[in-house]
Image (cartoon, rainbow, N blue to C red):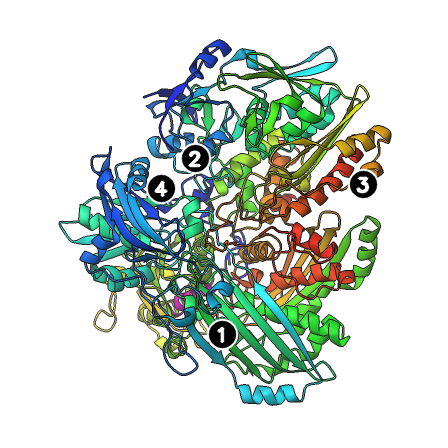
Amino acid sequence: MNDVVPFEGIGASVRRKEDFRFLRGRGAYTADFNRQGQLHAWILRSPHAHARIRSVDVAATTGMPGVVTVFTGADMAKDNLGGLPCGWQIHNKDGSPMAEPPHAVIAHDKVRHVGDPVAVAIAATRDQARDAAEAIVVDYDVLPAAATLEAALKPGAPEVHGGVAGNLCYDWHIGDKTVLDAAFAKAHKIVSLDLVNNRLIPNAMEPRAALGEYDPTTGDYTLHTTSQNPHVIRLLMGANVLHIPESKLRVVAPDVGGGFGSKIYHYAEEAIVTWSAGKLGRPVKWTADRTESFMSDAHGRDHVSKADLALDANGTILGLKVHTYANMGAYLSTFAPCVPTYLYATLLAGTYITPVIYAEVKAVFTNTVPVDAYRGAGRPEATFLLERLMDVAALESGIDRVELRRRNFIQPDQFPYQTPVALQYDSGNYQATLDQALAAADWAGFESRRAEAAKRGKLRGIGCSTYLEACGIAPSAVVGSLGARAGLYEVGTIRVHPTGSVTVLTGAHSHGQGHETTFAQLVADKLGVPVAQVDIVHGDTAKVPFGMGTYGSRSLAVGGSAMMKAMDKVIAKGKRIAAHLMEASVDDIEFERGTFRVAGTDKTKALVDISVAAYVPHNYPIDEIEPGLEETAFYDPKNFTYPGGCHIAEVEIDPETGKVSMVNFTAVDDVGRVINPMIVEGQVQGGIAQGIGQALLETCVYDADGQLLSGSMMDYTMPRADDLAPVSVATHTTLCTHNPLGVKGCGEVGAIGSPPAVINAVVDALRDFKVRTLDMPATPAKIWGIINGGRAMAAE
Amino acid sequence: MYDFQYHKPASVADAVKLLADPDAKAISGGQTLIPALKHRLNRPTAVVDLSGIAEMKGIRREGNAIVIGALSRHDDVAGSAEVKAAIPALADMAAHIGDTQVRNRGTMGGSISNNDPAADYPAAVVALNATVITSKRRITADEFFQGMFTTALEPDELVIAISFPVPEKAGYAKMRNPASRYVMAGVFVAKTGGEVRVAVNGAAPCVFRQGEMEAALGANWSAEAVGGIKQDATDLNGDIHGSAEYRAHLVTVMAKRAVAAAG
Amino acid sequence: MPQVTLTVNGQTHTAEVEGRTLLVELLRETLRLTGTHVGCDTSQCGACVVHIDGESVKACTTLAVMANGSNVTTIEGLAAADGTLHPMQEAFREYHALQCGFCTPGMVMSAIDLVKKHPDGLTEQQIREGLEGNLCRCTGYHNIVKAIAAAAEVMHGKRAEIARAAE
């Protein structure tokens, strides 16, 4: 490399390319797009959790200023539109498929949650559309609601969907119960724990928005939408809902202001604006108010579990039994059914040698917003369960909590390691991440800090979690056999332009992850093209061949691997061209960072010489090699990737108010090879903030009637800067063995590892109060209630 | 929001005339009214912007009182040399209302006229036994705040200024609602001319005086004096963030801290 | 309809608005300055923060008519005419204080006001508390706090440049 050019390849903290536009207010988010003749849609939403719609009377909207039309569910039904599809089918224990009731785009028989769309008013301005929506008269026959897991499971509970008995979507299990029972029979000790994984509302800072357009002269539809995966939306909406062929439907996900899972799914509003644009021949735009986000974006988590851990006299794990109820909400969101099954129960071995695991999961419909994947998706729930259980087991068996973990760790020489719940881990070193974290957090010196805090009247505690996740989603054949209705490969195109600059087309989508920089670094590293000359194109089905999008920490492990594969093809072709130009055998051509060389000689050609030759093929083996230098690769991962690590939280509690303050947080994560350390650190810090949010602040609350009590930022506690403490983030790398980059993924580790570390620290701080079960979030009122004698301190 | 007529009078007299319309609403900083309008909770025919009225501005010392114009923004109060010198607890309260942007727009007159149970200023007004000077009269603090979002103000009556007697001692402590950051329970303690007043905000539908604590502090001005006094939880607010019982407990804790802050 | 005249990023504009038009709507829809974002409807997220006469305000909680005659600065107006970034913008980039970019314009505008209000410097705790009116869901704020601390030193002449090497 040239000395004066800073290294930009793998391992460099290159400052982000995308920041130039974001910092100048030049980002282009969906709500920023406006079209000539554009109309605005306002969705009228159900105020009831459960009601039969007797009638929808739109007469009063006729002639209102600016109002163009109102569409109801009946109007959509007339066009024979499909319902919103579910992308994953789980099978019951008996082999029968899960209950999969229809999900109308606009409700027309019943509404099933507060926020369920009932009609859409379309007018010249947003205010006028809202005025019209308010003038619609809906006659509801209000029905009793099943607003919580508990309520939905009670005998005689209201049925969310007619014909779905007991509101049970599926009753699924994994593992061998007979073997488990035998292991439990031999146990020295069985530690049982009830756990609730609190329901969360994602709240990406950009509210969802959608802009539909239709060109009657060509029949082309275009949808701009706040999505993490535009190709998936095109597929689901085109094929299942609106019956528009891919060739006539373009989906663009421009700059997207955060997703965290909530923007994976195909939502009603996308279909509504696209279909309405076609009906009206004019662009139709919808932008959510935050209030609508609360009642229409898919929520996350919401598990109620019972776990039993069997140990021998040495604290060695003999087996784990888990029973979980998972809330699906009122309808099955796109990936909902896989979250509490294949993204949860398969993770229950964690970092430990667990000879046998048996888990059963019952998924339940309730009269609430659909629940789907939210940062971590299933894995935080598994980790919270396991890491709380380990702390309780340590306490009750008198073994130090760190020592208990060490005794049960999968050893570095045991990889590849086959768990009893389907996954095969390829690499990891849990001892190393634990040791590094203990040292960084000064775990050994904690007791003196506890004593010092006590002098100030504060209760100080420390807690750890040694977590594991599976990401880099996912081998298509494997997920297909498990019920996925899609492949989960990724697509990358490398287009080397004649003068040597590069455009990358990727099916991954960046909504904060910094792909435009990280992916450019891959090209810089491999092809030797400066980052400034590498342009990353994503988020547009008209530009990118195909793609499955960004979620499950898959962009680099799967999308990056596709790019590597495409670059291999570019290099292979380049070698043939270079061989021709340098009159050598192609077998003798070596390539490294932009230079083709005849092995053992000083004869070289730069990449630009090859690209010029490829596009200006004057001296070129035209009969043997096509002109041009552009390659596309589809990469299907061979396995999941398995990041893991250790998170340590240190908290202080004000016993007078019950307020828990974060004082320190230390993370040592193994995310595989690190491409851009600055970006990885940022991803981990952000994930930890969401994990601390779950542990201390955030929770979604419905009342018995299904009204959303935490329905705004006035009521739902979003983490603010002063709720959080400095975070120390470090990595310890073992490489992924099965993808070309050795990368694992870093987007979710923070949200997975941190909640149990924080709760373990809170429980440690409260050790004098003998706390065994502490449901998240550990709010001041809840903690004070414990200190004050175990009384619940939040009013119902 | 629904549309409305917008007026910007230059005098109190003109503003009062416009507010004779019962469907008109006064606006100063707008930090409470605008969010309510956005949610269509309110449908005024006219909005009367008071920000151009000179008579309602300014902070000055008048004898043994600090007189704060109704249009004084929280940031003005927080930064005022007069307030900081005479009633530092009030300046400090102002410095911790809402967030920076609220403090850059929101006004004292607007806050007390709205009388949100979770607002800060009502506790200071009551504990400091301030007098509310309106376009019609002078109203004592004890008479001014009448209930949740209810004051002694008549529909066409405007707060012009608030006159705070300078206390010997004053302190304020609050626990914030973790989500909204409004007051969940706050206590303002003050000793003025030998009289002790203790005002509690956030915990109940309206600011109220805590008589038992006033008596205790009158006898012995110390955190210990209030530490053993339990607030009755009856009639206190409860919500998903904390029960009435928790708020009652916080009243004692905040009272201790307010006394400690007052010195 | 009321008419407002205001200076935005140095340019004077006159526009007809409704009484109910919010400043953020005027900026985004009439003036097409879409760098100012709307992230909530309860005045809490701060994505819409702009400066009016040098002070930070939430443009979603300000009527356009109330900004009549004032001087408004938005994120688009921060960088110098030659494209040089404001030290706060530069610090956000250098310290990786943004991810999805949605909260960033409001965060930067608030941060500048915060630094200006503390000419004697800011502690980490003051920065965290000073960001109470701005929500970020991506970064966990950690790098935002570091960026503001660095920018404050540059803005107050205590440090020559934003680059981390200067630390």
Query: Does the magenta segment cover residue B104?
Result: no
Residue sitting at x 54%, y 43%: C92
The chain identifier of the residue carrying mark 3 reads: B
Residue sitting at x 68%, y 65%: A464
Residue sitting at x 74%, y 62%: A764
Q: Which residue is mark 1?
A: A361
Distance from disc 4 to disc 1, alpha carbons, whole Å, reads 42 Å
Q: Residues within 10 Å of mark 3 (few under 14, many from 20)?
A: some
> What is the span of residues highlighted in magenta in the rendered image?
A552-565
Quarter of image, res A93: bottom left
Q: Is residue A154 visible?
A: yes
Secondary element at image label 4 = helix
Q: Which residue is mark 4?
A: A32
Distance from disc 2 to disc 3, alpha carbons, whole Å, reads 41 Å
Quarter of image, res A186: bottom right
**Residue type at mark 3?**
Gly
Q: Earlier in the sequence, mark 4 or mark 1?
A: 4
